[in-house]
Image (cartoon, rainbow, N blue to C red):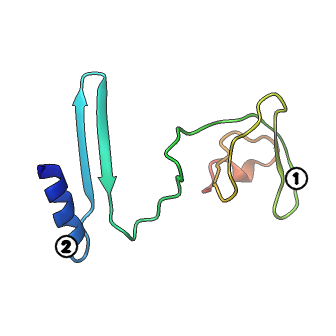
């Protein structure tokens, strides 16, 4: 189809051309993004972003983060996180993962 043909053209161009395709049908839609083979993707499984209540962070390097006992996290080794509202260690708020 045309979208596949256009995306293949973008990938074959040197340097590669980023390709974004999106459609919306009322409340439903899709978006497809392809920035080529050299574009880093840190989202291993495409799941929605999750949030958890942090109860403590140690000051060691690396720090150990503990989440509220009633809500176990489901992160895997190597995943990156951000901390938007930490009290007491504010320098990590909104920092890069």
Residue 78: percent from the left, percent from the top? 66, 59
Q: Measured along the vertical axis of the image, is residue 84 above or below residue 4?
A: above
Quadrant holding the C terminus: bottom right
Residue drawn at point x = 79 percent, y = 40 percent:
87
Q: Residues within 10 Å of mark 2 (few under 14, many from 20)?
A: few
Q: Residue at x 33, y 62 (%)?
A: 35
Instruction: Using residue 29 as the reference point, say whether residue 72 is left or right of it.
Output: right
Question: Which of the two discs, 1 and 2, labels the residue nearer the N terminus?
Answer: 2
On the image, the x and y values in percent for residue 72 come to 77, 35
User: In the rendering, at what x and y percent does residue 29 appear?
Assistant: 29, 32
Among all residues in the image, which is located at the extreme left?
2
Q: Report which residue position mark 2 lands on.
A: 13
Q: Which element carries disc 1, helix, strand or loop? A: loop
From the top left corner, tell me how far across and down residue 81 is, in percent: 65, 50
Closer to us: 1 or 25: 1
Q: Is residue 63 left or right of residue 2?
A: right
Q: Residues within 10 Å of mark 1 (few under 14, many from 20)?
A: few
Closer to us: mark 1 or mark 2?
Answer: 2
Residue 6 numbered tag: none
Q: Residue at x 21, y 58 (%)?
A: 7
Residue lying furthest top? 26
Find residue 68 and report its image quarter.
top right
Judging from the image, what secondary structure is the residue with disc 2 in? loop
Between the residue at mark 1 and the residue at mark 2, the CA separation in whole angstroms equals: 48 Å
Pointer 1 with pointer 2, Cβ within 8 A: no
Residue at numbered disc 1: 58
């Amino acid at each position: 189809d045309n979208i596949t043909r256009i995306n293949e053209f973008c990938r074959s161009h040197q340097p590669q051309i980023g390709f974004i395709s999106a459609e919306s049908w009322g409340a439903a839609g899709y978006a497809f993004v392809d920035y080529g083979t050299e574009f880093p993707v840190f989202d291993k499984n495409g799941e929605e972003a999750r949030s958890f209540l942090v109860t403590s962070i140690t000051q060691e390097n690396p720090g150990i983060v503990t989440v509220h006992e009633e809500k176990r996290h489901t992160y895997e080794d190597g995943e990156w996180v951000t901390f938007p509202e930490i009290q007491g260690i504010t320098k990590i708020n909104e920092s890069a993962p």
